[in-house]
Image (spheres, rainbow, N blue to C red):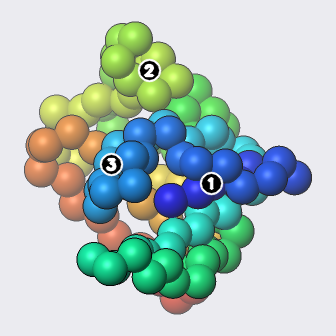
């Protein structure tokens, strides 16, 4: 697997060893990224590169104005949290909203129960 950031050339992705099928890595935010992979079979035949479409990771932190909290929320801090902080609520009626013009949205959370709803027809 190789990764390309912004206008840099493709380079071997950190954490890959030529035999790894899945790995964890940290990707930079707010940077165009592309990834490509190719396969090698048991006799050494190598496939052509298959390249992803470019994508950008954009993170939203608790203190940003594009996140709107309703109900009881507290900010927790830890060096183990992305950006150093997160919002936490134990209130059943608490909600958090984010308006996005993106076509794909992912929510990263702890192993607690969360409910996610989308009111936008453009969400994929």
Instruction: Identify the residue position indicated by label 1 in the image.
Output: 3
* Residue 18, x across and y down, in percent: 40, 55
Q: Is residue 88 above or below residue 39?
A: above
Q: Is residue 8 above or below residue 83?
A: below
C-alpha gap between disc 1 and disc 2: 28 Å
Position above or below: 103 against 72: below
Residue on which disc 2 sits: 85
| Residue found farthest to the right | 7
Secondary structure found at label 1: strand
x and y, in percent, of residue 41 in the image = 33, 79
Camera-nearest residue between 85 and 74: 85
User: Which label's residue is closer to the chain start, 3 or 1?
Assistant: 1
What secondary structure is marked by label 2? strand
> Where is mark 3, residue-wise?
23
Mark nearer the viewer, 2 or 3:
3
Q: Position of residue 120 (x, y in %)?
A: 52, 80
* Image point (52%, 24%), residue name: 83
What residue is drawn where x is 58% and y is 48%? 12
Is any atom of residue 56 visible in this view?
Answer: no
Residues packed near mark 2 inside 10 Å, few (<14), some (14 to 19) or many (20 plus): some
Q: In this view, which residue lies farthest toward the bottom?
A: 121
Quadrant in which residue 49 is drawn: bottom right
């Amino acid at each position: 697997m190789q990764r390309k950031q912004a206008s840099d050339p493709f380079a071997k992705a950190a954490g890959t060893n030529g035999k790894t099928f899945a790995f964890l890595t940290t990707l930079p935010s707010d940077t165009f990224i592309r990834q490509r992979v190719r396969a090698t079979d048991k006799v050494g035949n190598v496939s052509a590169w298959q390249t992803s479409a470019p994508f950008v990771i954009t993170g939203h932190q608790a203190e940003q104005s594009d996140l709107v909290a309703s109900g009881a929320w507290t900010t927790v801090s830890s060096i183990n949290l992305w950006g150093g902080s997160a919002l936490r609520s134990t209130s059943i009626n608490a909600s958090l909203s984010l308006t996005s013009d993106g076509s794909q949205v992912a929510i990263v959370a702890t192993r607690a129960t969360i409910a996610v709803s989308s009111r936008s027809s453009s969400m994929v």
